[in-house]
Image (cartoon, helix red, strand yellow):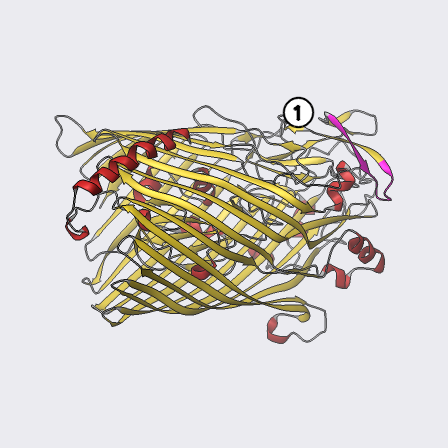
Amino acid sequence: MAAIAIILAIGLPTAAIAQDTQEEPKAERAEPENVIVVTARKRKEDILKTPVTMTAMTADQIEKRSIVSIADVAANTPGFNVNNNSSGRADRTIQGVIIRGFTPSTVVATTTSTFIDGVPVSSPSALNSVGAAERIEVLRGPQSAYFGRNTFAGAINVVNKVPTGEWGGSVTTMVGTRSNYRLRADLEGPIAGEALTFRATFDRFGKDGSWVAKDGGTLGDQKSTSGSLLIAAKPASWLRAKVYASYSKDEDGVSASTRISAVDIRDPAGNIVYKGQSNCTLNGFDGAGAPVKNPFICGTLPPPADQLSTSRVTDSFVKKFLSSPQGRVLDPSQGVQGYGMVRRYFHLHGTVDVDLMPDVTATVLAGYNNESWSQFSDLDSFDSTAVPNPFGGPGSRSYFDFPYLSERISKDYSVEGRLSYDSGKFRGVAGASLLDGRNRGSIGGGNGALGTTVFANGGGTDRAKTLGFFFGATYDLTRALSVSLEGRYQIDHTYAYNPRPGAPVPSGLGTLLVDSTYRNFLPRVIVNYDVTPNTMVYASVAKGVNPGAFSTGLITATPEVRALALAAGVTLRVAPEKVTNYEVGIKGRAFDNTLTYSLAGYYAPWRDQINSIVVVVGGAGAFFYGSANTGSVDLYGVEAQTSWRASDLVTFELGGAVNLSHINAFTNRSLTTLSGITDFTGKEQPNSSKYSAVGAIQLGGDVRGVNDAKWFGRLDWNYKAGVWTDQANIVRTPDRHVFNVRAGISRGIVSVEAFVTNLLNDKKYVSVYDNFMFTPMFEYTGNYSALLVGMPELRAGGLQVKVKL
C-alpha cells in the first residue's frame, strides 16, 4: 500500500504538469498502448476511465499466470477467496466465491455471480470450459443494475475472443511432475469470409494429487475434459451475432482434505486411532443448556497430527449402494462410481446486436445452463477399520464407517433485451431480463446396510425466477465531470417443491410447499471527474439485494425437531439480505503512460444477513439445517493495484487489499453452545482474508543475434492472510505465501516454457470449515469437535510447448 501511495504522489503532479503544458484537444493526443477495454457497464470502456472498482486479466496475463480455474482467479486477485468445503469434503464439487468478506451463509448460496459474455452461468465451474478468453473481469461492489440477481458483492465476467476471418490456432502440450499433463488445441477461421467465422477449442487436463494417504494412494487427483465452439456472424455492418456452446466433464478422486480433531478417537482397547489436537477448553453448553467444558483448538491451526487417511476402497457395499436408483436425482450410470466426484456441465448462449440508428443499438442475449455433479466421500475422514460397528448386520461392515453420497442437478435459462444510446454528452441503456433457475439434490449413506436398508434421500426442487427492468444513463456535465444514474427494479419469486409419492407433479417440479415474492429497486449513482487527462476520481453509492430463502425442513419435521429448530432461531421464510455500498476511488496513468494505477476505498453496511443454523437432534448424529436473518455486519476496506513497465525489459505488477469487517449483530446456537459466546459484536467475518496481495516481476525481450526470437521470465507472488473458521473468531488458518516462476523462449510459431508452481512448497491450508468427529455412538456431535481443512497443491514443475498454426 505504501508503495502505491508513493507512486500516486509522484504520478499526480506529473500528470497535472502535463495538463498545464499541453493544450491540444483530447482527439489529438496519442492513445496509450496499455489500454484494457472492459464492459462493466454493458459498453466498451477503458478500464481506467470506468468508475467501477474492478480487476481485469488480459489473455496474455491469463496465459503467463497459467489461470485455468476460479481458484486461480482468486489466487491472483486481492480481496477474493474461494471456499471449497462442503459436507465433509474439500474439492471442486462446490466452490463458494467470496469478495470483500461477503461470505455467503452456505457454499451453495452465493453473493457473487459469474457470467460469460454477460450471460449468467450457474456456477464458477463454467470457467473451466472457456477455451479462449480475451479477458476476465472481476467487479467489486453491488452490480445489480447491469448484471442482476446475486451480484450482491460483485460479479465475474469472462469475455470470449471473437474469431477473425483469418485462419489461425495453436496446439499446446504440457507435462509435469505427479503425472501432470495438458493437451490444448484451438482453431479459428472463416466459414464465409469475415461475415461468418468460428473458433473451436479442446482441452484435456489431468494430474495426480499432491498428498499421499496412509494406504499409499494419492489425494486430490483431478481430470477434466472440455470443448467449446463459438460462431460469430457479421452479415452486414449494422448486424452482429454470436453463438457459444461449451461442455466439460470433471472426474476427480478422493479430495485432498482431512480433519483436525479436538478429541482422541480410541478403539475398544483404549488405543488412540486418531489423535486429538485440542489446545484450549471452551466454556460452552450441552444440548440441555447446562454448562460444559468443550475441548477445542484455539489460535492458529496446527498441521495434522497424523498422515492423511480416508476410505477409498470401492467394495461390494459401495457398489451396491451406488448402483441403486432409489432416492437419487441422477441415474446411477451418470453418477460417481466410487469415492470421488464426477461433474458434467453444458452451457449455451447467443447474442445479437442490431444498429437501429447510428447512435442506437438493440441487443438480445439468451443463455442456458445444465450442471450435474455426483460426489461420494468418507464422511468420518479417518482410518476407522479398528473401530467396531456395534450395529453390524447383513449388508453392513464389521467396522465403523460413514460413506456419504451427495448429488445435485442445476438448470437455468435467461434472456435479456436492451437498447443502448451513445452520442455526444449522453450515453444510456435500458432493458429487461428474466432468469429462471431450479435445482434439486439428494444425499444418503452412513454406517448402516448400504443399498439394503440405507438409500439416498432425494430432496425437493428449489426454483428462483427473477424479472428485472434496468436502466443506466451517463451525462457529461463538462468535459471533465460526468454523472451516472443506474438502477434495476427486480422481482424475485422463489419456490420450494416437495415431490411426494403418488401426488400430482405440476410442471415436473413436485408439490408446492412454500413460495415468496420480493420486489426491490436497486439504484447506483456515480460521479466521476477527470482531474487531468490521465487521472480520474470517482465516488458512488449503490444498493444490492440477495434473494430470500426457505427452511423447508420445518414443514416436514417432527414436532420435537421443529421445536428445537425454532428455539435455535430457524425461520420458514428468510427475508432478502441487503447492502448499501459507498465507494470512492482514483485511477490513472503516469510516467508517459508506462505506469497505471487504481486505488479505491469502500464502506458497506450489510443488513438482514442470512446465516445458516445447524441444530443437533438428540445427539445421535442427526442434524437439522435451517437459515434465518440473524446478522448485521459493516464491511470496509481499501484496494489498490498498479503496473509499471519500467523499460522494454522489465515490468512490475503490484496489488493489495485490506478487507475489514465488524459484526454488529449475530446469533448462532451451535457456536454459542460450543464457545459460550452470546455477544459476537466486534468479531470479524469468516472465510475471508483480511489482508491479501499479489506481485510480479516480468523480464523479457528479443534474443540477441537470433531473428524473430523472444524470451521472458516471470516471478509471481500470491499472499492471502489466514481466515477465521466462523464468527466466534476462535481459530484461524495460517497465512499463505505462494511463489510461482515461469520462463520461456519463442521463435516463429514455436514457444517453449518451463514452470514451477508453489516454489517454496507452502503447505498451509486453503480452506477450513467447522465440523464433527464421527464415531459409532456419535459421542462428539453434540458440539463442533473438529475442523475440516482443505490441503494445498504442493510444489510441481513442468514443461510446456506451444505451436501456433
Where does the image place residue 372, in percent across and percent down from the top left?
A: 54, 56
Residue 214, placed above or below residue 165: above
Q: Nearer the viewer, residue 429 or 265?
A: 429
Dividing the image into 4 quarters, which one contains the N terminus? top left
Where does the image place residue 783, in percent across and percent down from the top left?
A: 77, 40
Residue 295, placed above or below residue 461: above
Q: Nearer the viewer, residue 481 or 692?
A: 481
Give amino acid for label 1: Ala
Where does the image place residue 195, in percent across and percent down from the top left?
A: 21, 65
Residue 673 shown left or right of residue 301 in the figure: right
Crowd class of label 1 (few under 14; some 14 to 19; many from 20; radius 10 Å): few
Residue 802 shown left or right of residue 661 in the figure: left
Q: Secondary structure at mark 1?
A: loop
Residue designated by label 1: 305
The residue depicted at 73 percent of the width and 27 percent of the height is 276
Q: Start and end of the magenta stretch?
A: 280-291
Where does the image place residue 563, in percent across and percent down from the top left?
A: 83, 56
Residue 267, placed above or below residue 534: above
Q: Is residue 281 magenta?
A: yes
Q: Is residue 382 magenta?
A: no
| Residue farthest along the front direction in this orientation | 20
Can I make out residue 398 in this image? no
In which image quadrant can residue 619 be found? top right
The residue depicted at 48 percent of the width and 34 percent of the height is 692
Can I make out residue 212 in this image? yes
Residue 632 shown left or right of residue 579 in the figure: right
User: For the image shown, how many numbered marks are present on the structure?
Assistant: 1
Residue 263, placed above or below residue 326: above
